[in-house]
Image: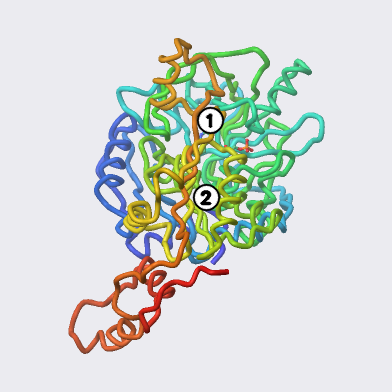
Amino acid sequence: MNYRDLREFVEVLEGENKLKHISAPVDREWEIACIARWVLECFGEGEQFALQFDQVRGYEIPVIVGLYSCRDFYARALGIDSSEILNHWSTALRNPLKPRIVTTAPVQEVVATGGHVDLSSLPVPVWTPGRDGGPYIPSAGIITRDPESGVQNMGVYRVQVQDAQQAGLFFGTEMQHGAIHYAKYCKQNKPMPVAIVIGGPPSLNFAAAAKTAYGQDELEIAGALAGFEIEVVAGETVDLLIPAAAEIVIEGLVWPEKRFSEGPFGEGLGYMNFAAPAPVVEVSAICRRRDAIFHGYVQQLGPSEGHVIWEMGLLGPLWFYLKDKLKLGALTDLAVLRGSAGLGMLAVQVKLGHTAEARELGKVLSQINFGQKTILLVDDDIDIHDLETIQWALSSRVDWEHDIEVVKDMQTYQLDPAILAALQRQHHAANKPPYTSCMTIIDATLKCDTPEVSLPGRSHMAKAFERWQEYGLPELKKRQRLERLLEKHSDEGIQFNLAK
Ligand SMILES: Cc1cc2nc3c(=O)[nH]c(=O)nc-3n(C[C@H](O)[C@H](O)[C@H](O)COP(=O)(O)O)c2cc1C
């Protein structure tokens, strides 16, 4: 199923009781974030559900969060199984699909321009109540255009509502593609048009968060991920093409040199970031559907929807690069370890017995540095989405003297407590990114012939599974971790033969 807008996907989740409506009136300034936090913390993998706040006090527009809060929801939003996500990304990156221009758009059913523009008409939540500098739009795809090539870009950069007609725009690094565009406009001393896109086909959210090559329009990737051309319409007040099926679009101009204090904001790394000067969007139009839904992400201390989207936006293009471009055939899976702030710990699964290639992969990945602090190499009998199994591999397959490589002085834009401590030790101030950090490569692959895993033989396990109904026990949902381990298991009780 390819979802043409946010509400088509919402309907499906709703039909499966995976989206709960809250009809009690809630306050956007603290309550939405707190309810979402309780749900995120207390319902684990497999139990998750999205939340729709139908009555936000003072607003007609409902707020929805948690639509893509696990790999399963993410995959289903693309109409695929979660085991297919990385290959689906590769196929999309190989075959971008140009958007199709249309002349009317649901997102332009209600248009406010000039003096009618009022950002406070939108139910923008405060995500870290008592700490954030104000309400934030954390989930929007920010569309800008390269003033030289004319090619559009769409990236997720947070937007802080400052007043009725102004909003702060945060670029994490000068290398963000929107920031590169802005630098070009500043050089030409011209304002940069922007469109802040909230809600839409799920693939829009996923493409906006992805690190694709500079000059690649993410709307084309969104189309390829969705399997249909994204319909776009001319902006009402800016020369940009805007997704017609979005829920809300805020248009505006970002002037060179104009700066406001942005932040503090509770970041995905799991800590508050401080306030600092940032570019400002002067809003020229707010366009929306008549019955618009405000789609937000919880994005603070992980795991959360923001983390899932971020992780996949890193892993999809990375997988494409490693498999399609570098042809690293021993690679079998990639994952960011759950709980590692969307990027901290990268798990790399390789074919059993390919230790040399695994180490090569570790080196390549340490050069493609996107802020990860640990690269963990494991064999393909380890389910890298299962933290218990990862702990087992770490506990039993690593010689902590020989299997660890520390790569020093890697650049990162994150300012985590470890980097802060290092800066303090060196008596340096935490001025601005890039910061430097160490990265560790841990080789947890098997490096010699090894006794078999202590599980019953594969055929005995299969027989018990076949007879399951006769035992009168609750239905079994197979666990990937066990499937993987048994796959490499023999019935004869022999050793893994690693001699190649
Ligand atoms: C929920 C979420 C929030 C994000 N917030 C920001 C942000 O505020 N600023 C930023 O520079 N990047 C942010 N990112 C990361 C960028 O979206 C990501 O690096 C993306 O590749 C940027 O697009 P670009 O490559 O076209 O610049 C965020 C990602 C996610 C998933």
Seen from the viewer's position, the closer of residues 174 and 221 is 174
Indicate the quadrant containing the N terminus: top left, top right, bottom left or bottom right: bottom right
Looking at the image, is 35 positioned above or below residue 377?
Answer: above
Residue occupying image coordinates x 79% and y 36%? 150
Q: Quadrant of residue 142?
A: top right
Name the spot of residue 470 as percent of width and height, x first. 21, 89
Question: On the image, numbered disc 2 is attached to which residue?
Answer: 312
Question: Which residue reaches farthest right?
Answer: 148
Seen from the viewer's position, the closer of residues 248 and 74 is 74
Name the spot of residue 209 as percent of width and height, x first. 56, 42
Q: Is residue 49 visible?
A: no
Q: Is residue 418 visible?
A: yes
Q: Is residue 438 left or right of 367 when viewed as pictured?
A: left
Near mark 2 (Cα within 10 A), the count class, few <14, some 14-19 or many ≥20, is many
Q: Amino acid at mark 1?
A: Lys
Question: On the image, numbered disc 1 is attached to which residue?
Answer: 408
Seen from the viewer's position, the closer of residues 251 and 368 is 368
